[in-house]
Amino acid sequence: MTTNAANAMFTGDRASNALGIELVEAAEGHAVATMKITETMVNGHDIAHGGYVFLLADTTFACACNSHGPVTVASGAEISFVTAGRLGDHLIATATERTRYGRNGIYDVTVHRETPGGPEVVAEFRGRSRTIQKASR
């Protein structure tokens, strides 16, 4: 099952686990993860430090691109911050595979928070992946 590869990779991800990131869902080419913005994640402007938002998106991207089985790493990524995250926000990141070609892939991740008016996008992330190892048997 493809989700086993994503779950195994996430279980060994000490950085993401230390920040309280939770993998909610992993399926072939898709993943959802969450993270709560804590006091140690807020910068001098009293908003979520962009590095933490990037890390949540990157972790979710990693789970999606590793869902196929072979070891896959990022070859590049970019993020656009749409609005600021705030202390206490429960961020939800959803990664979707756009395409895979050869050993390469492109994935989009939307990071949002729930508000009384519905989901509010915090950031949009695009990751490029590169498979570096065949799936184990």
Image (cartoon, grey):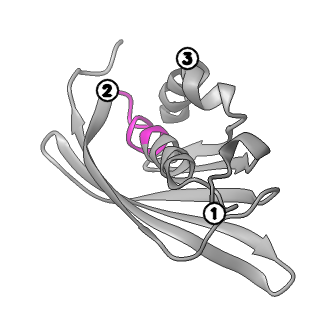
Dot 2 and dot 3 residues touching (CB under 8 Å): no
Q: x, y percentage for residue 7?
A: 58, 28
Looking at the rendered image, the disc whose residue lies closer to the viewer, 2 or 3, is 3
Q: Residue at x 77, y 45 (%)?
A: 38
Looking at the rendered image, the disc whose residue lies closer to the viewer, 3 or 1, is 1
Look at label 1 and name its amino acid.
His
Disc 2 designates what residue?
70
As helix, strand or loop, the secondary structure at mark 2 comes to loop
Residue 119 counted in the magenta span = no
Distance of mark 3 from mark 1, alpha carbons?
33 Å
Look at label 3 and name its amino acid.
Gly
Residue at far top of view: 137
Residue nearer the viewer, 54 or 41: 41
Residues drawn in magenta = 62-70
Residue 66 counted in the magenta span = yes
Disc 1 designates what residue?
45
As helix, strand or loop, the secondary structure at mark 1 comes to loop
Q: Residue at x 24, y 21 (%)?
A: 134
Look at label 2 and name its amino acid.
Pro
Disc 3 designates what residue?
12
Could you tell which of marks 2 and 3 lies nearer the N-terminus?
3
Q: Is residue 77 left or right of residue 2?
A: left
Residue at far right of view: 116
Dot 1 and dot 2 residues touching (CB under 8 Å): no
